[in-house]
Image (cartoon, helix red, strand yellow):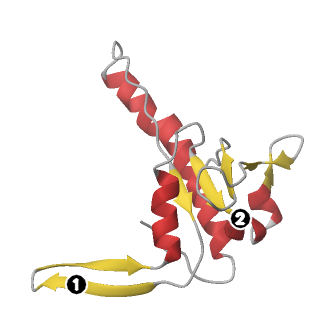
Amino acid sequence: MGVFVGNSKNSDAAKCALQINWASKNIVAAKITEKYPKSPFVLKQRVGIDTSKLFIARTGIRGSNDLVWVGNAANNAAKLAALDPRYPTYITADVYKKLDENSKFGGAPKRNMWTDLGDSDMGYQIYGSTFWWSF
């Protein structure tokens, strides 16, 4: 899980997700194919992004503790990441509304990188993207 803060947190998170998509296709999948050329395995990954206030607590015992993230964004992002892998990146409408132009439009010619998927899968409006962003 990643947490983004600041004025451009939604756009930064979306760009990072698109970079993860690029890296999984161009670095990780390439290494798998190189090492196992006869394998039928196809790497699929998904990233889910939502935005909200979160409560963070350190839980556990001394020497064995972790951070727990509580809030709508953590819950919704996890649910989005569990959706069908037809889109490697999913965002909520709240995130989409806050994206800057560079994180919303890409390609040549420029077009919307995000497909409106409605609200049938989650009960709230979501968007999916198959675009990637190299680094």
* Residue 45 placement, left or right of 93: left
Name the residue: 58% across, 56% down.
122
Q: Nearer the viewer, residue 110 or 91?
A: 91
Q: Residues within 10 Å of mark 2 (few under 14, many from 20)?
A: some
Q: As shown in the figure, which amino acid type bears the numbered disc 2? A: Ala
Q: Position of residue 41 (x, y in %)?
A: 37, 23
Name the residue: 75% across, 72% down.
98
Mark positioned earlier in the residue sequence (2 or 1): 1
Residue 73, above or below 44: below
Q: Residues within 10 Å of mark 1 (few under 14, many from 20)?
A: few
* Residue 35 placement, left or right of 11: left
Label 2, label 1: how many angstroms apart (C-alpha)? 31 Å
Residue 120, above or below 25: below
The residue under label 1 is: 59
Q: Position of residue 34 (x, y in %)?
A: 37, 23
Q: As shown in the figure, which amino acid type bears the numbered disc 1? A: Thr
Q: Quadrant of the N terminus?
A: bottom left
Which quarter of the figure has residue 119? bottom right
Q: Position of residue 65 (x, y in %)?
A: 18, 79
The residue under label 2 is: 93
